[in-house]
Image: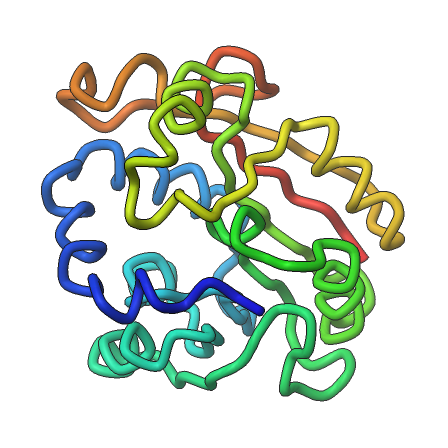
Amino acid sequence: MPVIEPFEANCAEYDRWFDENRFAYLSELEALRHFIQAGEVGVEIGVGTGRFATPLGIGVGIDPSLRMGEVASERGVSFAGGVAESLPFRGEEFDFALMMVTLCFVDDVKRAFDEVYRVLKVNGSLIVGFIDKYSFLGRTYLHKKEKSKFYRYARFYSVDEVMAGLRYAGFHKFKMIQTIFGGLGDITAVQSYREGHGDGSFVVIRALK
């Protein structure tokens, strides 16, 4: 079963993080935007409160938390309640799909990737944004996860683990960038992203169907 209760009960606190960590948020947003082409029809899986879907022009979002979905709807997202392992969409419906820090809360990553593959058009792209568990921030979250309302039940992944899952689902032609260099408190301006991984805590992988 998906972890819903912390997000339902603490929706306002979750949403406030983006204001309190504005430059980290904007840095992640810019990295994601790098892989989105104008005019493409997309869906965000694990849309939360729409903090990424809305500025990225993603019109459709799905999330198991209906409370978070209400906020996303207020921000202009066409919201559907549901989980990544069973997407309520037709096959080959979208040009791209975004999973933004969603993997760590998914029960069955293989099934989720299979579902995303199904709803993407041929040559469509899956954009996965996540905290590398071996990065500075990843190690920090792992160390403190038992004290976190949101990450207590999360499972963090390495770049190699995410890549292996994508390949198994049939995705190919990977491109990868990274951002969030240093701790959150050190970020006082929007950071530029770089190719590859290993230095930045936040990694974005684009994979094609």
At 26% across and 40% down in the image, what residue appears? 25
At 35% across and 44% down in the image, what residue appears? 29
> What is the x, y in percent for residue 54?
31, 66
The relative height of residue 200 versus residue 21 in the rendered view (above or below) is above
Q: Is residue 8 left or right of residue 96?
A: left
Specify whether residue 172 is in view.
Answer: yes
What scheme was used to colour the molecule? Answer: rainbow
Q: Nearer the viewer, residue 139 or 114?
A: 139
At 49% across and 25% down in the image, what residue appears? 178
At 11% across and 46% down in the image, what residue appears? 19
> What is the x, y in percent for residue 137?
39, 22
Q: Is residue 155 left or right of residue 209?
A: left
The relative height of residue 168 versus residue 22 in the rendered view (above or below) is below
**Image quarter (top left, top right, bottom left or bottom right) of the N terminus:** bottom right
> What is the x, y in percent for residue 43?
53, 71
Q: Is residue 75 left or right of residue 204?
A: left
**Image quarter (top left, top right, bottom left or bottom right) of the C terminus:** bottom right
Specify whether residue 193 is in view.
Answer: no
Q: Which residue lies furthest to the front in this view?
A: 146
Give the quarter of the image for residue 68.
Answer: bottom left
Count the labels in the image: 0
> What is the x, y in percent for residue 11?
21, 65
Give the quarter of the image for residue 10.
Answer: bottom left
Give the quarter of the image for residue 144.
Answer: top left
Q: Which of 152 and 46 is in front in this view?
A: 152
The relative height of residue 30 versus residue 197 in the rendered view (above or below) is below
The relative height of residue 119 versus residue 25 in the rendered view (above or below) is below
